[in-house]
């Protein structure tokens, strides 16, 4: 993303809940927010990914 671009995490999370099929997730609980917010991956390099909140993870799949 360029320096002038920002993302709205809540907007993206809402769009995800309303439009994306997550095959291993109870969709009703996900759509209502009962299971929490989705993880929005923002960047990745090698086995490391970073979400939109700045948390880093190791992708072991």
Image: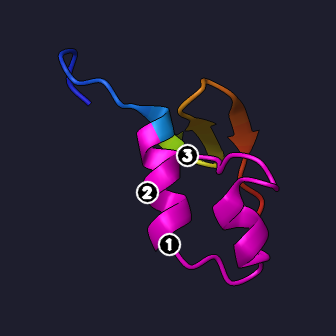
Give the residue drawn at x 30%, y 24%. Answer: 6
Q: Secondary structure at mark 3?
A: loop
Q: Earlier in the sequence, mark 1 or mark 3?
A: 1
Q: Are marks 1 and 2 in contact (CB under 8 Å)?
A: yes
- Which dot, 1 or 3, sits closer to the camera? 1
Which residue matches tag 1?
20
Q: Residues within 10 Å of mark 1 (few under 14, many from 20)?
A: few
Whole-Å distance between the Cαs marked 1 and 3?
Answer: 12 Å
In-front residue for pair 58/16: 16
The x, y position of residue 47, in whole percent, is 65, 49
Q: Earlier in the sequence, mark 1 or mark 2?
A: 2
Q: Are marks 1 and 3 in contact (CB under 8 Å)?
A: no
The residue stretch that appears in magenta:
11-40
Q: Residue sitting at 64 percent across and 65 percent down?
A: 31
Q: How many marks?
A: 3
Most extreme residue toward the front is 32
Q: CA distance from mark 1 to mark 2?
A: 8 Å
Colour treatment of the image = rainbow
Q: Any magenta on residue 10?
A: no
Residue assigned mark 3: 40
Residue 33, percent across and down?
A: 71, 53
SS label for mark 1 = loop
Q: CA distance from mark 3 to mark 2?
A: 11 Å
**Residue 15's disc number:** 2
Q: Does dot 2 land on a helix, a strand or a loop?
A: helix
When the figure is inspected, residue 35 is found, relative to residue 29, above or below; the finding is above
Q: Is residue 29 above or below residue 11?
A: below
Q: Residues within 10 Å of mark 3 (few under 14, many from 20)?
A: some
* Vertical order, 57 against 35 (above or below): above
> In the picture, residue 53 is in which quadrant?
top right
Answer above or below: position of 17 versus 21: above
In the rendered image, residue 15, in percent from the top left (x then y), is placed at: 43, 57
């Amino acid at each position: 993303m360029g320096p002038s671009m920002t993302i709205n995490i809540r907007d993206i999370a809402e769009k995800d809940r309303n439009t994306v099929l997550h095959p291993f997730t109870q969709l009703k609980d996900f759509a209502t927010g009962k299971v929490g917010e989705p993880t929005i991956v923002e960047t990745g390099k090698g086995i490391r990914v970073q979400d939109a909140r700045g948390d880093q993870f190791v992708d072991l799949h």
